[in-house]
Amino acid sequence: MNCLTSMRLCARHVSKRPFTGLPKMQAPAFPLRQFPRMSSTAFHFAEGEDAQQLTRDANALLQQGWAQDGEGMGVTKTFHFKSYFKAVAFVNMIAAESASKKHHPTMTVRIGSVDVHWTTHRPRGFTQKDVTMAQHCDRGADLMGAVDPSQGLKCGPTV
Ligand SMILES: C[C@H](O)[C@H](O)[C@H]1CNC2=NC(N)=NC(=O)C2=N1
């Protein structure tokens, strides 16, 4: 054991080494602000919205299977159908209401399902319009025979 590996202080080395202070703090692997988001219940309401009313409505939508989007700016839900034709008919039903209300969702159509996302672009955020349109989707889905996810048409071989 020499003077560097032992815990004993060696006057020869201690005196020759300049004091460099405490070891530098290591930066975290990623900036703390980019830490993965915990699931959050904070919606970003657009300017001018009635926050109390919108909070009640947003919570009711969450109870109906809607989920907050990643930014808290809107809500998303996937509707399932037994045929592609029904999925497309559902999209058209939403499209008709969107044209009439001048409020448009982002939709992804799959063989037996439709993803719907409601948010408001101007003013930016979640609004009563998104709530009204999401409620319209739920009513339309019931009328058009939306099914449980397990019953929806899936791509691939049937077993
Ligand atoms: C002029 C027109 O009514 C606006 O651009 C509408 C169109 N559709 C819209 N749809 C959605 N989702 N958000 C909007 O802010 C919006 N604005």
Image: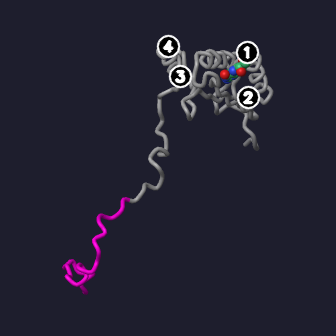
Where is mark 3, residue-wise?
A: 45
Determine which of the numbered discs, if any, sits on residue 135 in the image. Answer: none
| Res. 97 image quadrant | top right
Question: Is residue 29 rendered to the left or right of residue 106?
Answer: left
Question: Is residue 16 rendered to the left or right of residue 44?
Answer: left
| Res. 3 image quadrant | bottom left
Assign a secondary structure to mark 4.
helix
Quadrant of the picture in which ligand 1 is shown: top right
> From the viewer's perspective, is residue 9 above or below residue 131?
below
Which quarter of the rendering shows the N terminus?
A: bottom left
Assign a secondary structure to mark 1.
helix
> Percent x, y for residue 140?
69, 17
Where is mark 2, residue-wise?
A: 82
Q: Which amino acid type corresponds to the residue marked 2 in the rendered image?
A: Lys
Magenta part of the chain = 1-25
Mark closer to the chain start, 1 or 3: 3
Where is mark 4, residue-wise?
A: 53
Determine which of the numbered discs, if any, sits on residue 97 in the image. Answer: 1
Assign a secondary structure to mark 2.
loop
Q: Check if mark 4's residue and mark 2's residue have beta carbons within 8 Å.
A: no
Instruction: Give the CA separation, mark 3 to mark 2.
Output: 35 Å
Instruction: Give the CA separation, mark 1 to mark 4.
Output: 23 Å
Q: Which amino acid type corresponds to the residue marked 4 in the rendered image?
A: Gln
